[in-house]
Amino acid sequence: MAKQKVDLLIENASELVTLRGGTQRPLLGERMRDLGIIKGGGVTVRRGRIVSVGKTREIKRKFESEETIDASGKVVMPSFVDPHTHLVFAGSREDEFEMRIQGSTYMKILERGGGILRTVNETRKASKEELFENCKKTLDIMLQHGTTTVEAKSGYGLTTKDEIKCLEVMKLLAQKHPIDIVPTFLGAHAIPLEYKGKADEYVNLVINEMIPAVASSRLAEFCDVFCEKGVFSVEQSRRILLSGRKHGLL
């Protein structure tokens, strides 16, 4: 029998992690340990799609490839999907880590103008070009460590103009970087300082101005909210999410 032609063969993987046997429901208990590992595994690829997986010797009996990668001594596995990132931001808050390990809570740091609001201030001052270069470096590092898809939230602008700016940077990154980016609008990430004590007014801004602007520009696929004591209440969060759903940010 003639062998099928493929574009790529990855052979001799010490461990090939297939994650076979998945169902529509999450695996629980001991079943979580079953990763579908094949020792001495092989993978064939044609036109960017996986054609087959199995023991290398079995794969090579059926397929011949223009290119072969010897994965001896290595693990071959699916790439990582990071479902929660805050990709676009400026500045750094590593000094707050010391405050956290000394017992300060996140909410105490936020009340003193740190946390999210500190990053908001830096992000507002940054240009789109600066944000793009900073975030590209982050994505490069993530790709080197095996992540190929990220969900990316906005939320460090907290004005209509700056939220749009952050989402536009995400769009540009999605066009120019190999990592797949799923953009989420998170204008309700915190209550900005200019709305301190006026949370409902800010919620109205998110609902009546930000969400329609984001939806009409098609810069985000989803809408999120930081529902937390001292930030957005359950009722405020419900209003924001219902508005997002109304505008197609599902």
Image (cartoon, grey):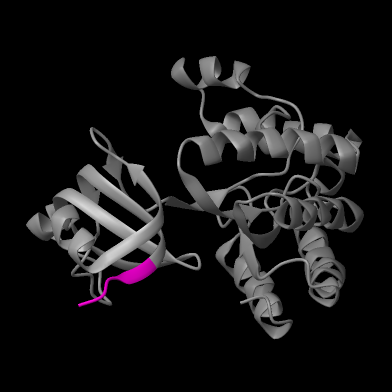
Residue 147 x %, y %: 49, 46
Quadrant where the C terminus is found in the figure = bottom right
From the image, give the main secondary structure of the stretch colored magenta: loop
Residue sitting at x 55%, y 33%: 106
Q: Residue furthest left?
A: 30
Residue sitting at x 50%, y 68%: 47
Q: Is residue 126 left or right of residue 241?
A: right
Q: In this view, does 250 lie above or below 13?
A: below
Please indicate, yes or no, whether residue 142 appears anywhere in the rendered image: yes
Q: Residue furthest front?
A: 2
Number of disc labels: 0
- Which of the pair 4/135 is nearer the observer? 4
Q: In this view, does 16 lie to the left or right of 122?
A: left
Residue sitting at x 87%, y 44%: 194
- Which of the pair 96/141 is nearer the observer? 141
Q: Is residue 239 above or below residue 164?
A: below
Q: Is residue 89 above or below residue 164?
A: above
- Which of the pair 245/167 is nearer the observer? 167
- When asked about the image quadrant of residue 129, the answer is top right
The residue stretch that appears in magenta: 1-5
Q: Is residue 12 left or right of residue 168?
A: left
Residue 3 included in the magenta stretch of the image = yes
Quadrant where the N terminus is found in the figure = bottom left
Q: Is residue 80 left or right of residue 226?
A: left
Residue 8 x %, y %: 41, 57
Residue sitting at x 27%, y 41%: 75
Please indicate, yes or no, whether residue 103 appears anywhere in the rendered image: no
Residue 153 x %, y %: 65, 54
Residue 103 x %, y %: 45, 20
Q: Residue furthest bottom?
A: 246
